[in-house]
Every structure is written in C-alpha cells, then in structure tokens.
Image (cartoon, helix red, strand yellow):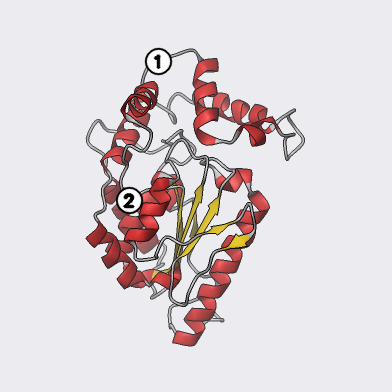
Amino acid sequence: MGESDKPLLRYSTSEMAKDAIEIFDHLCWTGKRELHVIGPSMGGMIAQELGLLIPERIASLTLLSTAARIVNTEGFIENLRNRINLFIPKPVDQQLAVAKRNLFSQEWLEAADVEGAWPTNGDRFAAQEITKRRNTTGFTRKGFILQAIAAGWHHKSPDQLMTLADKVGRDRIQVMHGGRDRMVSAPHGDVLVRELGGGGQSQDQDQDQDQGRGQDQIRYVRFENCGHVLPWEKREEFTRLLEDFIDDVEELNRKEAVAGSASARASAPATAETVGETAGQTAGQNSAL
C-alpha cells in the first residue's frame, strides 16, 4: 500500500519488520529501550517480529487487534465465506458494507460523526475508503492481495512468543482487542496474551472493571463492545491508556537507568517513538486487513 513499489513476490511480516528496522537505523533510533512500538492489525504482527529481532531497543510494545497466527474461531463455513469475500470483486457499496461489518461495531457506525463533517461515523469511513480506492497507484488489488497473504502466513509459535516476552519484558507489553472484532476475532487476543506468558487476565474497558494485573505482567485491555479499529471507536480512552502505558514504561526506564531512553537523556532532541506510522502504516493499516 502507499507509494512504495509493489513487486510481484511473496511478502512476509518478517521482511516488513526488517524494512522498518532499516528506517529506524537511518533515523539513528538505535538506543537501548528507545522505541515505543504500536502495531495495529498486521502492524501488530510486524511488531511481534520487531520484538524478536531488536528486543533490547524496544521500550514498550503495544499489540493492537492482532494475532500470533490466524486461526478459525467462527466455524469452517463462516470462516471460508469471510476469507473468500476479501478477494471476490463486487460493487463498491457491497465492498463498503463488508468492510464496515468487519471493522466496526454497528453502534459506532450509526453514531454521529465525531468530527461533525458527515452525518455518521459510517459515512466518514465510506468517504475515506472511496477516496483511497480512487488512488489506483497507492491502493492496488495486487498489493492488497499480497499484503493479505503475508498476514495469513504470519505465524508465531508459543515458544517464540515466550522468547519475545522474556527479552522485551512483560511489563513493557500491552495487548488491546475489541470483543466484537470480526477481522481478527477476540479469541486471538486471549491466545496472544496467554502465550506471551501474561495469564490471559483482562481489563474490560467498556465495563470499567479491572480483573487484575500483577507486577511484571502484560497489560491486557478488552473493549467488549468494539470492533477492529479501536483508535477510532474509543479515541479518547485509547489515547489515555496509551499515554499512561508509555509514562509507566518511561518511569521504568528511569528506575533501570536506561541510557538510551528519553527520560535518561533529557538533553536529547527527541525520543524515538513509533505510533502506528512506522510499524502499522508500513503494514498498510488503513486497508481492510
């Protein structure tokens, strides 16, 4: 997606992670515990690869609406239908209807547009999608299919996830998922947390009930009434949780006297933070993955 070249070859989340590391290196974002990585959807798969490739450079790792591997949680027929629908050409209104259903809760789609420019949130999303699809060089069918295949082939074993968590640190990892996510269903979040060694306990943000998180444990936040795109559906809550998490990690850096952290280098011009644009947008997050 975007303006990058789209050669006809097998794409993989590991190669995309290496692309991101080349960007970090070019920007001199190479310090210890310097990167705050937020990976949504396939960006979360790329973020897992980063956690295995450069764990010592990661200050915090937020895995958002993502999976260690895609498994069938809906039954064979429903799963097959959903996957086929991604690739069958259809009129744009049908494409938008499918994308809306997979990405968002119905309540959010029907609510008034948060920016006020469109009647509903669903109308805003439709306008954005139509605009994107008019960009025939940035959004190509070939690029979308190859990207979807890369997400489908992504596979991290329990042993790999345990290694990732051991090296990055469980108190530096946060997982968020929507209970009504139809693109990457909610059980994927449960599996991800469990195999990272986090115990699978969650904070139901919609009910404001904290089920507990011990010291040195992964943060797991479930928005039970939300779909796939949490930063849109829960803009303020998502931002607050993310800021709180990063603040906590920077405090952890101070306690550990990490030389490469923003807090330990107050005179440095800026800390190296990736907030979706690096790990997530490299993955083409705005596409219907």
Which amino acid is tagged 2? Ala
Quick one: label 1, few (<14), some, or many (20+) residues within 10 Å? Answer: few
Residue 186 appears at what percent x and percent y? 45, 45
Give left or right: position of 103 versus 137: right
* Residue 30 - label: none
Q: Which residue is mark 2?
A: 68
Q: Residue 9: tell me if it is visible.
A: yes
**Can you say which quadrant of the picture contains the N terminus?**
top left
Give left or right: position of 174 versus 14: right
Farthest-out residue, top: 91
Residue under the image location 43 percent in, 82 percent down:
258
Which amino acid is tagged 1? Pro
Q: Taking 188 as reference, is 113 above or below it?
A: above
Q: Nearer the viewer, residue 126 or 136?
A: 126
Q: Nearer the viewer, residue 220 or 156?
A: 220
Q: Taking 121 as reference, is 226 above or below it?
A: below
Farthest-out residue, right: 116
Q: Nearer the viewer, residue 234 or 127?
A: 234
Q: Which residue is mark 1?
A: 89
The answer for how far apart the CA atoms under marks 2 and 1 are is: 29 Å
Q: Earlier in the sequence, mark 2 or mark 1?
A: 2
Report the mark closest to the observer, 2 or 1: 2
Quick one: label 2, few (<14), some, or many (20+) residues within 10 Å? Answer: many
**Can you say which quadrant of the picture contains the C terminus?**
top left
Residue under the image location 42 percent in, 60 percent down:
200
- Location of residue 168 (image quadrant): bottom left
Residue 239 appears at what percent x and percent y? 62, 57
- Location of residue 196 (image quadrant): bottom left
- Location of residue 29 (image quadrant): bottom left
SS of the residue at dot 2?
loop
Q: Taking 5 as reference, is 61 above or below it?
A: below
